[in-house]
Image (cartoon, grey):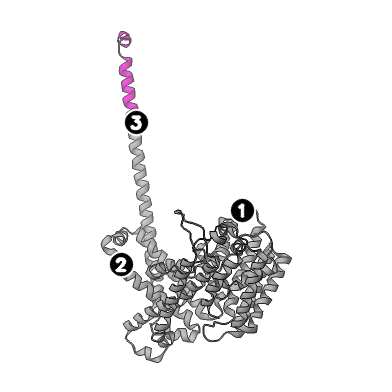
Amino acid sequence: MSPLNCIPLCYVLKDLLDGRPAFQKHLCFTLIGLGLSYLNYGIDCGHYIISLLVNFALLRLVGGTQLSVALSFLFNMGYLLAAYYYVSTDGYDIIWTTPHCIITLRMMGIAFDLFDGQTPKEKLSKDQQATCISKAPSLLELFSATFFLGGHFAGPQFSFKMYLDFIHEQGVYKAIRGKDCPDRLTPTLKAAISGIVIVLFFAACNPFLNPDIIASSEFEHLPILEKVAKLSIFGVLFYFKYIGFWLITESICMAAGLGYNGTDENGEHKWDALVGVHVYDLLTTYKYRVIIRSFNLTTNLWTARYIYKRCRFLGNRFLSQGISLFFLAVWHGFYPGYFFCFMLEMIYVIAEDQVINLCDKVPVLKALTSSPAAQVPLYIFLKAFNMFFWCYAILSFNYLRVSKVHYVWSQYYYVGHVVYGTWFLVYFTLIVPRLKKMAKTEEKDKLKRAIEHNRERTSFSMNTVAEFLTLSQSICSLPKNTWLS
């Protein structure tokens, strides 16, 4: 069944289920979602049922403990990786493992949320307080959250607490009951139409520039500038494939009402609770960090909430980020291409931070980058540079196998590795010592200025005391009748 069919179905279900008991809603979403899953994946959807039964047992027996979190992580990731091992092919597989990887994160998130719910609220972060749950969910609640049409087939990720508020019409969802529901048709159609247009554009362009062309023998003989241009265009099309589908899944959630996010400061209703991508930021930015923050938002939020922030005890931001990216690579599968892609992603971000720091500390670079006349040419250069190297990393995500990745990267002479490897060599051997020397000189100048300032203040104080003593002596030397007058 096409995801597009889920949009009108969820829109109708929202109106039919408003105000009804939670049991009826859970049962409805479970039966419809499970039925559609069976139509798509057949008997393989039995893997989801097995996973849910085991997770339900873990949550009921040891839920809310560190042991439950550990066992949930081991079971869910173990089941997913075993599935990858036995059923994966040489390509990017869209089979029953795709919904299962969504279920994996959702079940582990529930284990974390129940654990947080047993902790005093004053010890929890604001984010943890918003997602924690105090008791283990029922089996029907687990099935309902898993097979909900808006999040089963390809995400987005949402917290179990958000889903319960949606079902029970609590929190912000009080505002969208029955006839009081604000207009959700407009944002639903806007996201759905945008997604459809982008998917159609991708489908129209794909025959002329797809991954097979870049990996073909004919590609070897093209001029290097044409190769660079085609890679950059391929990377944009790679984005479009995911952007279109995320917009469609977002529209499904909005049609059902799950995407509601209260009102803004002007009282306007927001339907951005489950936005998967910031299209404008993604396509216009020249910064790697903005790309990451604009792409696959709900999965990135899940990773930040349950992996990155839980690694704070390590005391190292880059180590926490490395663990998070390693987890995402494993979650995608065993293929080396995933690890290559996320490794380059981290390298790019570290190098970008170094360049920004350098531009802030070197006056000449700071003046150049802040000059109004340099903004347009600088943006064009950085945008082209960013697009090419980001697409260079994406190649490994697409080709996966070492032999294929090596072949396509060799077409570009491993330029991404050479450029960033050279940058780190220059940065740590030449730039860092120079920055340290500049910092020491600046510190000495500050100390010198502070000493001179203190001397001036001391001199001023001594002069004031001397003048006061002179004035006192003059007054004391006057005749007494002068004082009286």
Image quarter for residue 334? bottom right
Residue for badge 1:
123
Q: Say which amino acid is labelled 1.
A: Lys
Marks 3 and 1 sit apart, C-alpha to C-alpha, by: 55 Å
Q: Position of residue 324 (x, y in %)?
A: 54, 68
Residue 428 visible somewhere in the drawing: no
Nearer-N-terminus badge (2/1) = 1
Nearer-N-terminus badge (3/1) = 1
Is 134 positioned to the left or the right of 415 in the image? right
Residue for badge 2:
378
Residue for badge 3:
462
Marks 2 and 3 sit apart, C-alpha to C-alpha, by: 55 Å
Q: Main secondary structure of the magenta part?
A: helix
Dots 2 and 1: beta carbons under 8 Å? no
Q: Residue at x 33, y 20 (%)?
A: 472
Mark nearest the camera among 2 and 3 is 2
